[in-house]
Image: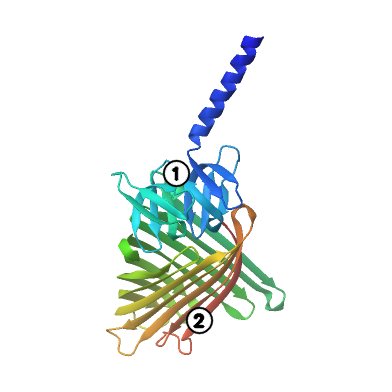
């Protein structure tokens, strides 16, 4: 019986050791809790870690982490714009961490200077992101029916990222022509040191409100993240744009070479609330005096189980529209969504 008991104890210790070995990364929180597992991602001030004792990943506010120790290799971005890869180990008794790359080169930085961490050899799905929002409005007056669907997806690699979106808005109302708005696009961004980037994109828009059958816009340019921290990021970009348009009325098709400037602001270190705002302004080189602008503002509130609610507004301006008196168009939506 004693031999059997010792054998069971030894087997139990062996299983616990193997289990602990699989959980290679560890965190010490400011409240003195210790979490051991596999770090997946730090983005927008939230760290995800997978543990062997929970069915779901833990999400932890980065500001609540006191020390971090990793054994795996990670892609790491600092607020200064420096991009590197390696393991991370805190310096006990300080707010500093040491990052050691594959060649054993080291740098020492403050913990709060780290704004992005991603597993270097993570699977496809752990590098991907996706979300879909749906909203539906019904009113008795004028028999109004409105459906809105908004979706986006993305993929992040060590030096580049790919983002896409597809949105639909359909409105029907008695005694009024139906309104259809469909838009989508894809953007490739090459990430460089010191928060500089190059990007190219293609997008399309169909909008019955402005008699726009199809607008296809290709852009190529670059920019810089002026602010990149665990509270927010703000980037500016500029470049060239080629615009091709066809219309649902008698207006002739247009081709235009444009210059553009853009801005994107994301504020996210506010508990479960975040704000994303984008603005693009286009000035035509081939159509004298023509300019247009696109603006979008989304406010997102996170709910349990990866659900969220999101009110938002999209605004478009064109000083030379195909439909007279339709220089502006705006859409306000309130949706419920889920993200991967």
Q: Residue furthest front?
A: 93
Residue 276 marker? none
Q: Which residue is mark 2?
A: 329
Image location (x, y in percent) of residue 258: 30, 79
Residue 192 visible to the viewer: no
Identify whether 230 is placed above or below 209.
above
Residue drawn where x is 36% and y is 71% of the image: 216
Q: Which of the 4 image quadrants contains residue 301?
A: bottom right
Q: Earlier in the sequence, mark 1 or mark 2?
A: 1
Q: Quadrant of the N terminus?
A: top right
Image location (x, y in percent) of residue 53: 60, 38
Q: Is residue 205 left or right of residue 311?
A: left
Front in this rendered view, residue 287 or 2: 2
Identify whether 297 is placed above or below 107.
below
Image location (x, y in percent) of residue 81: 36, 63
Q: Which residue is mark 1?
A: 70
Secondary structure under the numbered disc 1 in the rendered image: loop
Q: Which of the 4 image quadrants contains residue 226?
A: bottom left
Residue drawn where x is 37% and y is 85% of the image: 291
């Amino acid at each position: 019986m004693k031999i059997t008991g010792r054998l069971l104890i030894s087997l139990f210790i062996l299983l616990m050791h193997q289990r602990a070995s699989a959980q290679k990364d560890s965190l010490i929180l400011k409240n003195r809790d210790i979490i051991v597992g596999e770090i997946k991602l730090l983005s927008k001030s939230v760290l995800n870690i997978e543990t062997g004792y929970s069915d779901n990943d833990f999400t932890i506010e980065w500001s609540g982490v006191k020390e971090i120790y990793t054994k795996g290799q990670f892609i790491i971005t600092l607020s200064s714009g420096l991009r590197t890869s390696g393991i991370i180990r805190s310096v006990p008794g300080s707010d500093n961490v040491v990052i050691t790359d594959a060649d054993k080169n080291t740098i020492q930085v403050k913990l709060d200077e780290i704004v992005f961490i991603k597993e270097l050899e993570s699977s496809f799905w752990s590098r991907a992101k996706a979300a879909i929002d749906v909203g539906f409005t019904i009113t008795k007056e004028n028999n109004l029916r409105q459906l809105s669907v908004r979706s986006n997806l993305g993929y992040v690699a060590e030096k580049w990222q790919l983002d896409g979106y597809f949105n639909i808005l359909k409105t029907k109302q008695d005694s009024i022509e139906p309104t259809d708005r469909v838009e989508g696009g894809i953007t490739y961004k090459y990430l460089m040191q010191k928060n500089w980037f190059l990007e190219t994109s293609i997008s399309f828009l169909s909008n019955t409100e402005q008699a726009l059958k199809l607008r296809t816009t290709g852009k190529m340019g670059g920019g810089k993240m002026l602010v990149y921290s665990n509270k927010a990021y703000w980037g500016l970009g500029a470049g060239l744009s080629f615009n091709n348009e066809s219309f649902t009325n008698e207006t002739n098709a247009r081709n235009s070479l444009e210059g553009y400037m853009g801005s994107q602001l994301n504020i996210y270190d506010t508990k479960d609330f975040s704000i994303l705002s984008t603005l693009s302004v286009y000035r035509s080189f081939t159509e004298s005096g023509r300019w247009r602008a696109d603006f979008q503002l989304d406010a997102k509130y996170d709910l349990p189980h990866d659900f969220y609610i999101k009110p938002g507004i999209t605004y478009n301006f064109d000083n030379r529209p195909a439909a007279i008196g339709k220089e502006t168009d705006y859409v306000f939506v309130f949706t419920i969504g889920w993200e991967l």
